[in-house]
Image (spheres, grey):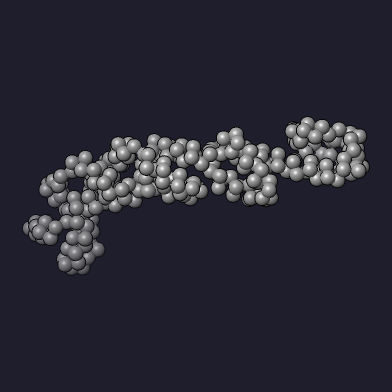
Amino acid sequence: MTKVTKIQAQKRKGRYNVYLDGSYVFPVGESTLIEFRLMKGQELTDAQVELIKNKENTNKAYGDAVNYLSYELRTEKEMKDYLYKKEYTTPTIMDVMDRLKQLNYLDDEAYAQSFINTQLRMSANGPKTIEQKMFKKGVPQAIIADKISQIDQDVLLENATEFAQKQARKTSHASFRQQMTKLRQSLYAKGFTGDVVDQAIASLDLEKDEDTELENLRKMIDKVSHRYDNTSKLINYLMGKGFSYTAIKHALEDDDE
């Protein structure tokens, strides 16, 4: 048996140092102090001392977990990784995880739904990108598949169309062919599926304007012609940018006149 000879408050509020038989042995938080009714003169067995230490460790881990959750929702995997990084033991982490789940502080299904809603509202990401992001955060694949299947397709199309409109303005200087290629590539890169990509582009009702195409071609010729020592190389470059051979020849002939 050992005796509690002193309980000394730390500078940090709610924390205490416990002395047994005149020597400092371990720190405790206020919740542990109250739970075990620790006080000066109390006698403790070795088993009780070990129990108090373990409980204090669990309480401290729980406090860290709650603090980690205070910034944003977390997946079970993120929480486990965080607590392991803090060097808590597996039994302690499992105790904390169980407690958090019982209180609904950890819920991968609720997390996935919230994450999807935020992505749809705040970003231009399509379902494939959202799926990849959730997978990296440790959401189980079954939950991901279920929640992704429930996304409103009208919302996806609206987001894809809005993103496509912005991209179309950014590529308005390019050839019509390249503009369409870049539009499609950018939508796929954001994680939209084929049907949504097709519908979004179709909804923009873009048409090739010959005057605009010629103007863009001439601007590009003026910009890059000095890089090429012969006309054939320049023509190949311009064709690679989506301009037709006939249009390029006419534009170059007009410049020579």
Residue drawn at x 79%, y 41% as measured from the top left: 52
> In the figure, is residue 232 to the left or right of 147?
left
Q: Where is residue 49 in the image (x, y as percent from the top left)?
A: 83, 43
> In the figure, is residue 70 to the left or right of 17?
left
Relative to residue 252, is residue 128 depicted above or below? above
How many numbered marks does the figure carry?
0
Q: In which quarter of the image is the N terminus?
A: top right
Q: Position of residue 147 (x, y in %)?
A: 41, 41
Relative to residue 39, is residue 170 depicted above or below? below
Q: Where is residue 168 in the image (x, y as percent from the top left)?
A: 25, 44
Would residue 170 be seen by someone viewing this image from the given angle? no
Q: Nearer the viewer, residue 257 or 161?
A: 161
Q: Which of 225 and 55 is in front in this view?
A: 55
Residue drawn at x 60%, y 36% as measured from the top left: 102
Q: Nearer the viewer, residue 68 or 138?
A: 138
Residue drawn at x 34%, y 37% as measured from the top left: 152
> In the figure, is residue 117 to the left or right of 236?
right
Quarter of image, res 32? top right
Q: In which quarter of the image is the C terminus?
A: bottom left
Q: Which residue lies furthest to the left in this view?
A: 257
Relative to residue 252, is residue 139 depicted above or below? above
Residue drawn at x 80%, y 34% as measured from the top left: 36
Would residue 218 be seen by someone viewing this image from the given angle? yes
Quarter of image, res 100? top right
